Each structure stands twice: as structure tokens, then as C-alpha cells.
Amino acid sequence: MHKSAIAVLALLSILWLPLAAQAEAEAEVARAIISTGVVDREPVDDLEHLNISDERAYFFTELRGMAGQRVSHRWSHAGEVQAEVDFNVGGPRWRVWSNKGIMGHQRGEWLVEVVNAEGEVIHQKRFQYAHGAE
């Protein structure tokens, strides 16, 4: 009976290791969207330019294969971090968003990064904040 238990454990480890490696390899940011809002856990639009009349920007991300991990949205303007919002990923497909109030004098290019618990940037998105943006 002892030998059969060892055999079962060996078989499980042979099956588990490839599955764990596959799950780790599939960790990704499936979607990253700049928007003017989020309704029913989905962005209302997908923008590269925000008009100065929009006083708030939303960064929506759909994360896959990252259950149990911690990620952050890091908002930067003019080379300086303006905000960082942390999230715990609670499932294999997890949708999260953060938002940032933007003032009229903060025109120009913005960068929002998805950062993992090790501090590595795993995805980034840029957008312009200006008068007459489309």
C-alpha cells in the first residue's frame, strides 16, 4: 500500500507540473483600455486621446492567469508618478480598473502601467490629454 501511495503522488506531480507551468505561461494582460467610464464592469469607450473637458480618466484591465497575485496601476505624467492603485487578483479572469482625476494644467502624454508584485512593468498604455482630443 505504501508503494501505491508513492506511485499516485509521483503520477500527480508528473501531471501537475506541466499544468502549473502552463498556467504561469498564460498569465497576461488580455485587455488594457483608457476610458471615460466603466459600467457593468466594462469600459464605456476605448480612447487614445482624452479631451480636457474630461476631468477623470479610467484605466481598465482584464487580467488572465494571475489569480492570487497582486498588481498595481501606476499613473504617470511628465515623468512623475501621480498615483498608484493596488489590486489583489481574485480569479483566473479578473477585471479591474482605477481612475485618476486630471486637472487642466496636466496636458500632454500620460502613461499608465500594470506592475506586478515584483515591481516589473508587465503592460503599459499611453494616452494624450489635450484640448480638442478625438
Image (cartoon, rainbow, N blue to C red):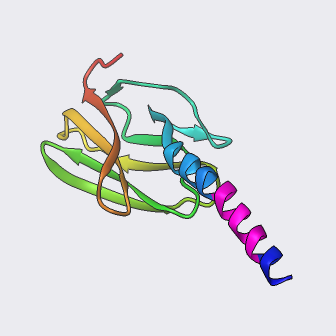
Query: Which of 69/82 is in front?
Result: 69
The residue positioned 29% from the left and 59% from the top of the image is: 119
Nearer to us in this view, 27 or 114: 27
Residue pictured at 60% horizontal, 50% vertical: 18
Choose between 63 and 133: the one closer to the eye. Answer: 63
Outermost residue to the right? 1
Q: Quadrant of residue 12?
A: bottom right
**Total numbered circles:** 0
**Location of residue 88 with respect to 78 vertically, above or below:** below
Inspect this view and state whether residue 28 appears.
yes
| Magenta: main secondary structure | helix
Q: Is residue 65 visible?
A: no
Q: Position of residue 124 (x, y in %)?
A: 33, 38
Q: Is 9 on the left or on the right of 1, as rendered?
A: left
Quarter in which the C terminus is drawn = top left
* Residue shown at the point (65%, 63%) measured from the top left: 13
Numbered range of the magenta stretch: 6-16
What percent of the width, then of the height, locates residue 102? 30, 44
Task: Name the one closer to the observer, 77 or 11.
Answer: 11
Task: Give the residue displayed 43% in from the left and 42% down from the top.
Answer: 59
Q: Looking at the picture, does residue 46 appear above or below residue 27?
A: above
Q: Is residue 100 left or right of residue 7?
A: left
Q: Residue lying at the far bottom in this picture: please name it.
A: 2
State whether residue 5 is above or below residue 117.
below
Instruction: Give the position of the N terminus as an image quadrant.
Output: bottom right
The percent position of residue 109, horizontal first and vertical second, equals 21, 32
Membership of 56 in magenta stretch: no
Q: Residue 25: where, in percent of width, then height?
A: 50, 45
Q: Residue furthest left?
A: 79
